[in-house]
Image (tube, helix red, strand yellow):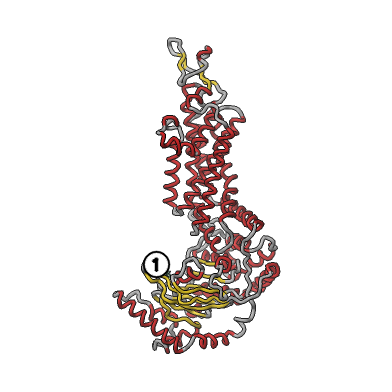
Amino acid sequence: MASSQNALLTDSVQSSDAEAQQPRQGIVLEFDRLGYVIKGKTILHDVSGRAEGGEMLAVMGPSGAGKSTILDILAKRAHATSGTVTVNGDANPDMRSLASYVEQSDALLGVLTVQETIRFAARLSVDWSTPSSVVHLRVASVISELGLTDVVHNRIGNAVQRGISGGQKRRVTIGSALVAMPRILLLDEPTSGLDSRTSREVLLAIKNVARMHGMLVIASIHQPNWQTISLFDRLLLLAQGRTMYFGPTNRLDVFLAEGLDQPVPKHANPTDHALDIVTTDFIVDPGKRSKHVSVLADKWLAYLSAHPPDRVLECWNSEKGLLLHGRGDHALRHISNGVLDDCYKTALLMERNALNYSRNLLAYGVRLGMYLGMGVLLATVWVNLAQTAAKVNDRLSVHFFSVAFLGFMSVAGIPAFLEERQVFVRERQNGLYGPGPYVLANSIVTLPYLFICALLFAVLCYWSIGLNPGAEQFFRFLGVLFMAVYVAESQSTLVAAVIPIFVAALAIASFWNGFWMCVGGYFIRAVNLPRFWYYWAHFIDYQTYAFDLLVYNDFHGITLDCATESDGSCFCDYPSSLITKGQCSLAGDDVLVALGIRGIDFKLYAVILLLIALFYRTLLYIVLVLKKR
Ligand SMILES: Nc1ncnc2c1ncn2[C@@H]1O[C@H](COP(=O)(O)OP(=O)(O)OP(=O)(O)O)[C@@H](O)[C@H]1O
């Protein structure tokens, strides 16, 4: 089964090779005396190593040994304080285009199925002209190799809906990286959450692909059993950031016996034995802890000088036969460049976002429910407002509430955005696409969903409240609400991009909306605002423009009845220009004059709203360009 799938993978890959026409060149990654110091603490001390295409290198060590740190440095996500990393001799390799990094956490879209997730990862990693049959075969083989066939149509799962297991999620994350066929695959704890049999199967699948395509695999691994660790060609054993051993995995026992004089007990696992020796977690005295590790590090250096690495590696290479210099390795992943490619990526992301938003209750479902509920509430609380001067304030509050509430509820989209953002960060760091296609796709696909929210709200409450009865006025009401909601959505998205922590983003986005309410001109008339707030905040507040537009749309051209007092005089709640003409009425335009919004340019205000949205979206792009994680 696995071999037939491998054949499929080979075929599919060969087809895309022909198109990509990549040079066939082996890959060699070397790191030399890497040191890493952070906040005055030395995390890595002169760690060196080497791996080649087609090989698997395990980075092993107790918790806190520096395994993730070294992967971060190799992926160029952290910068070594000293030492060098070279790829085929290049001291400044473009790791974004060469490597995929699978982090410890699984950043996936919960409502997508296993197959959809891996298929999108595959499509995002190939050239736009790659035939879909190639992608299909590649996806099918990865799913089969990683043992995900039974759950292929199951959703990943999120806070609302339970999905596949944690171990299966881990495999989906690995599959999403594997299917992209990077030249270097870096895996941080790929087997966490997997039982020992599944760990071995997954690593075997990775090994098969690595050997077949000359992919170089480096994985940090905590405490594997011997069967699992023996799948790795080389092993780097660390403790407190120091090298305890680096060399062929199958020679670890030789080193333990010869170098440390602590042979592996009969029937014991050499890696367990090695970890027992180097683990210092239970030595209470910090001085004794670091002395213990220093002694072991010195013993390794002494062993290394007595057994030069070339000799060790030569011996090892002859065991591997043709592997290293056999099949060439190919950069199968297509790295985004050019407008055409960006368009292709944008279209793909739009397709994925549409799928996500249509299924994800947290994206728009909750909001749709709230807008429906609020539409019904408005329709019943403000039901059938009489067209009288006494009801002017009630009408104004409808417009304020519509803008403020619909805008405010955009914070409900933050959890879904944060989930999407994590996927973006992972895919962007792996070089699949940049912030441009992401922001564009997000900005476009959001539109129809927000429009539906605004439409439902407007249909439910507009006629029932008895706002300006013209059809044109209804569509303007809808259009203004839609724009206001879009600006509010852009604002909340921006906040969550700057502070990708749910509670903090929620609090700040809510505060920001509350702030706009204060300076928008409803609670306190704009002309009465303290000058400081009036001159800057009032004029950049989207609620100012949306509220003014709704009020203008409702009041312009209508006439409201005033009250006739017991003495026969006419009382209007606002100064009326019609009383002098003998009518006991108030012109809607008189209200607009009193509010200071007479004669506003509807189109200009609508354009300002769009510009504010565009401004937030541009800021979102800039934030994502600058903020890499
Ligand atoms: N940004 C940082 N600031 C301070 N200390 C750090 C930072 N990054 C890593 N460390 C420290 O460096 C040490 C190594 O961390 P690292 O995550 O690389 O270990 P690890 O071997 O991957 O551990 P685990 O197996 O538990 O994931 C730890 O003691 C950690 O606390």
Q: Among all residues in the image, which is located at the extreme top?
A: 567
> Residue 29 in the image: x percent, y percent?
54, 75
Q: Position of residue 457 (x, y in %)?
A: 54, 37
Q: Quadrant of ligand 1?
A: bottom left
Where residue 286 appears, as percent x and y from the top left, is: 31, 74
Residue with the most extreme left position: 285
Q: Is residue 233 above or below residue 405?
A: below
Q: Is residue 310 above or below residue 482?
A: below
Amino acid type at mark 1: Ile
- State whether residue 210 is above or below residue 155: below
| Corner quadrant of residue 111 | bottom right
Q: Residues within 10 Å of mark 1 (few under 14, many from 20)?
A: few
Question: Which residue is nearer to you in this view: 403 or 374?
Answer: 403
Q: Position of residue 167 (x, y in %)?
A: 50, 66
Q: Quadrant of residue 122?
A: bottom right
| Mark 1 lies within 8 Å of ligand 1 (Cβ measured) | yes
Q: Quadrant of the N terminus?
A: bottom right
From this viewpoint, is residue 459 visible? no
Identify the residue position indicated by label 1 in the image.
Answer: 38
